[in-house]
Image (cartoon, rainbow, N blue to C red):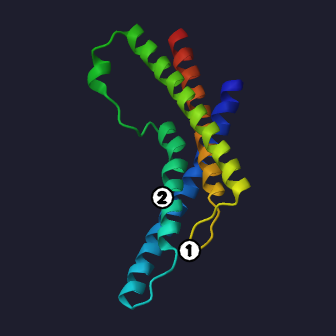
Amino acid sequence: MMGRLLSSLSYRLSGTMEICAGAALIAIMLLTGADIVGRVLGSPIPGTYEIVSFAGGLVIGLALPGTTRAKGHVFTDILLARLSGRAKYVLAVMTRFIGISIFSLAGYGMIMMGIRLQASGEVTAVLSLPFYYVAYALGGAFFVQVLILIYEAAEVKRSRHE
């Protein structure tokens, strides 16, 4: 029951974040194209660099949980093919727990950074866009990543016992 809830929640959240990442990527492409045309015509779009920088961070951060869920990361079969069943199991569980630890700390750090940025009122130079929105979004993405890794660790354990 808990596994289904965790799976459903992480799937919906990562799917929504993938859509947002895709929208940000499309925005980057359109804005960059429009800025290039504007430069050729002698009228570049102010703040393009700021928007593309923010959106690039969002693309990477928001796509991370979905990529993990889809098992789209680089996978080293050479090492795993030489390991025994028990060693594969231990390695799978250990890597999930290391990932949970790292992404928990990174998520916490990004949320704390967002709080500091919001309190200081720090904004970008040209468009005065606040930085804290991006920090909060990345912190949230890292916590969704943690949910997915917890689910994967439970699945590894469950498949081991079946």
First of labels 1, 2 by sequence position: 2
Left or right: where 103 falls relative to 95: right
Mark 1 Cα-neighbour bin, 10 Å: few <14, some 14–19, many ≥20: few
Is 154 above or below relative to 6?
above
**Residue beneath the point at 59% across and 32% down:** 105
Report the residue marked by disc 2. 56
Is residue 20 visible to the viewer in this orientation of the structure? yes
State the image coordinates of residue 108 (x, y, percent, origin top left). Answer: 64, 37
Give the Cα separation between the discs numbered 1 and 2: 18 Å
In this rendering, the count of numbered labels is 2
Front residue of 47/69: it is 47
Q: Quadrant of the C terminus?
A: top right
Picture coordinates of residue 157, whole percent (x, y): 55, 15
What is the quadrant of residue 85 in the picture?
top left
Residue ID for mark 1:
126
Residue 16 at least partly seen? no
Q: Nearer the viewer, residue 62 or 153?
A: 62
State the image coordinates of residue 30 (x, y, percent, origin top left): 46, 74
- Name the amino acid type tagged 1: Val
* Residue nearest the viewer, comparing 138 with 9: 138
**Left or right of 106 in this view: 6:** right
Under mark 2, the amino acid is Gly
- Quadrant assignment for the N terminus: top right
In the image, what residue occupies the spot 58% across and 20% down? 154
Q: Quadrant of residue 128?
A: bottom right
Residue 16 in the image, given as x and y percentages of width and height: 62, 51
> Which sits in the foreground, 148 or 7?
148
The single residue placed furthest to the bottom in the displayed view is 41
Residue displayed at 44% across by 36% down: 71
Labelled disc at residue 32: none
Residue at x 26%, y 24% (from the top left corner): 78
Question: Is 102 rendered above or below residue 44?
Answer: above
